[in-house]
Amino acid sequence: MAGLGWSTELIRIAPIAEVEPQAVELLLDRAFGTDRHERTAYRIRQGMPALPRLSFAALEGDKLVGTIQCWPILFDGDDGRDVPMVMVGPVAVEPARQRDGIGRDLMLCALNAAVATGDAGALMLIGDPEYYGRFFGFTADRTAGWRVPGPVEGRRLLALGDRVPDGAGMLGPRMPAVA
């Protein structure tokens, strides 16, 4: 049934390592624009590699149609408490395929992987609270005191997990421990 805007090809979710990094970057440019590196989310995770165990690609045949990446970050509490966290996203979907459920499937895959690997205790993202709250349980209940290295609407700073800090502090990259 050509021309109806859908494909009979199934979407396969695979580790992002199966995809060329340049293909991921080009998809992110199409989904978010080439100025995306200036966004606050990029500043929070600056210099950190994505976590391969929580980052996935959506493939239709051999074509990349979506990605999700998760990043190690740190909540540096004003009270001296450091809380390792995982920043979820970006969730990028080929613009012509948005609203096909690919982003939802990628989110579910990353969240399930976070549970399986023990990384689900302190997750955060910047996103639409109506969507991420309704479908995945993210809230801004404990994020009011958080600071980030750039502008963000407070209602879009969302978290999920039983180890999410609820005090004042700064979010930034989580540097690896020095031996």
Image (cartoon, rainbow, N blue to C red):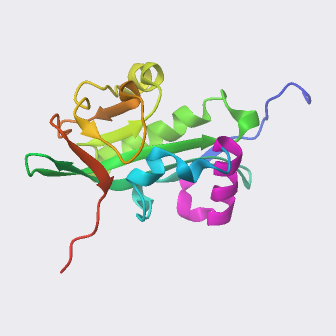
Among the 4 quarters of the image, the one containing residue 51: bottom left
The answer to whether 93 appears left or right of 157 in the picture is right
Q: How many marks?
A: 0
Q: If the image is split into quadrants, where does the N terminus sit?
A: top right
What span is in magenta?
13-32
Residue 113 shows up from this direction: no
Residue 18 painted magenta: yes
The answer to whether 110 appears left or right of 36 in the picture is left
Residue appearing at x 30%, y 26% in the figure: 140
Furthest residue in direction right, as rendered: 2
Among the 4 quarters of the image, the one containing residue 148: top left
Say if 65 sits above or below 177 in the image. Answer: above
The answer to whether 142 appears left or right of 23 in the picture is left
Residue 154 painted magenta: no
Residue appearing at x 59%, y 48% in the figure: 36
* Front-most of residues 100 and 152: 152
Residue 58, position in %: x, y? Answer: 62, 47
Q: If the image is split into quadrants, where does the C terminus sit?
A: bottom left
* Front-most of residues 138 and 12: 138
Residue 125, position in %: x, y? Answer: 39, 39
